[in-house]
Amino acid sequence: MENGYRPSPPQDGFQARRLISVDDLSTDDIRYLLALAEHYAGFLRMGARPQQRLAGKTQVNLFFEDSTRTNLSFELAGKKLGADVINVPVAASSVNKDEGFIDTVQTLAAMGAHAMIVRQQSPGRLEELAGRLSCPVINAGDGAQEHPTQALLDAATILSALGTLEGKVIAICGDIKRSRVAGSDARLFKRLGAEVRFVAPRHLLPDETAAGGATLFDSLKDGLAGADIAMALRMQFERMASDAERDEARRDYFATFGLTSDTLSYAKPDAFVMHPGPMNRGVEIDGALADDPRRSLILQQVFYGVATRMACLDALVASGGTSAAIGGDRADR
Ligand code: NCD
């Protein structure tokens, strides 16, 4: 176990000052975060206490959309590193009194936040926020745009299972068009040398231009051929326009595109399945396959979620000197 040795930051230092998109990270930043995630995974496996790199820092979790694992995972990650973590009870907050998003976040920042973890709906809002706040903003999922820490934890999980992403074939299957995970995953996995495929019926596929370099397949058999990883994405029922669309997705998708131990045989013989959760069992993935420890990495993804978010908080926040409340000087990081 290598957890006595912290991985060294990139030669020119860790460059990113926020994490809104995977494109905020240089390839060196990505490799450093993945090495740091594995370092923290070692502590988590042993139940050992890592250095309290966030002692004295305040982390604010602000989730305007539903979340279980992402929110808890950020909370646990911050606490493991010694931060004071505040979860804003959005449903009971002044947002419901029409206080604008930016005002709400600025108010929280003024209380002394050193990191602002935000999940919200609108593309572009986080950009505006990052321009106004001096503490790092971390995107915990924005509408159908981006989910950078999910992409990092997925990469960390694949690395732990396969040793590398270089040359690996990763087939992402499901409601790609409405997913914020698909695009972030595709761009990150490509940066690490993988071949990425989007596999879904035509109406669930994005335009080629929005595919982040992934190749599009509308046949499960063709899309899974030679794949090392088959990742299922959730049918995003809540984002569908009508009951008819929801009924059709519930009824028809599994028969033609569901991941089962039978359909997984289109992929490499030792291929793994993944799913960012929450899962619709019997819709995008068969429950027995999801639960099969020889084929499924789904719980490893949850485990690496904590380790990866520890890495992100460490790299973005730990060496920052001041909080947003007192003007935050980024030069001292
Ligand atoms: C995803 C999310 O919420 O963006 N899940 C997650 O963060 N673990 C995917 C989803 O909603 O389906």
Image (tube, grey):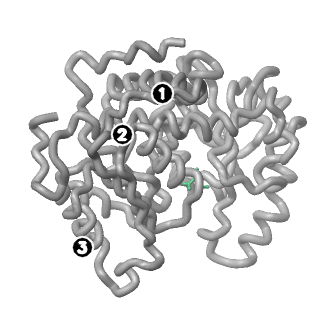
Tell me, yes or no, whether the two marked residues, 3 and 2, touch with CB atoms within 8 Å: no
Q: Give the side of residue 275 with respect to residue 250, left or right.
A: left
**Which residue is most to the bottom?**
97
Q: Position of residue 182 (x, y in %)?
A: 55, 46
Q: Position of residue 155 (x, y in %)?
A: 53, 30
As displayed, is residue 239 above or below residue 147? below
Q: Position of residue 194 (x, y in %)?
A: 54, 25
Residue 109 sits in quarter: bottom left
As displayed, is residue 224 above or below residue 85? above
Mark sitting earlier along the chain (2/1): 1
Dot 1 alpha-carbon crowd within 10 angstroms: few under 14, some 14 to 19, many 20 or more: many
Give the amino acid type for the residue marked by disc 3 in the picture: Asp
Q: For disc 3, does the CB lie below 8 Å from ligand 1? A: no
The residue that label 2 is drawn on is 313
SS of the residue under disc 3:
helix
Q: How far apart are marks 3 and 2 (CA)?
A: 24 Å
Dot 3 alpha-carbon crowd within 10 angstroms: few under 14, some 14 to 19, many 20 or more: few
Q: Nearer the viewer, residue 209 or 229?
A: 229
| Picture residue at 22% right of the left edge, 50% below the top | 135
Dot 2 alpha-carbon crowd within 10 angstroms: few under 14, some 14 to 19, many 20 or more: many
| Picture residue at 24% right of the left edge, 73% below the top | 103
| Picture residue at 79% right of the left edge, 47% below the top | 285
Give the amino acid type for the residue marked by disc 2 in the picture: Leu
Quadrant of the frame with the N terminus: top right
Q: How far apart are marks 1 and 3 (CA)?
A: 35 Å
As displayed, is residue 318 above or below residue 32? below
Which is closer to the viewer, label 3 or label 2?
2
Q: Distance between the residues labelled 2 and 1?
A: 12 Å
Numbered circle sitting on residue 40: 1
The residue that label 3 is drawn on is 103
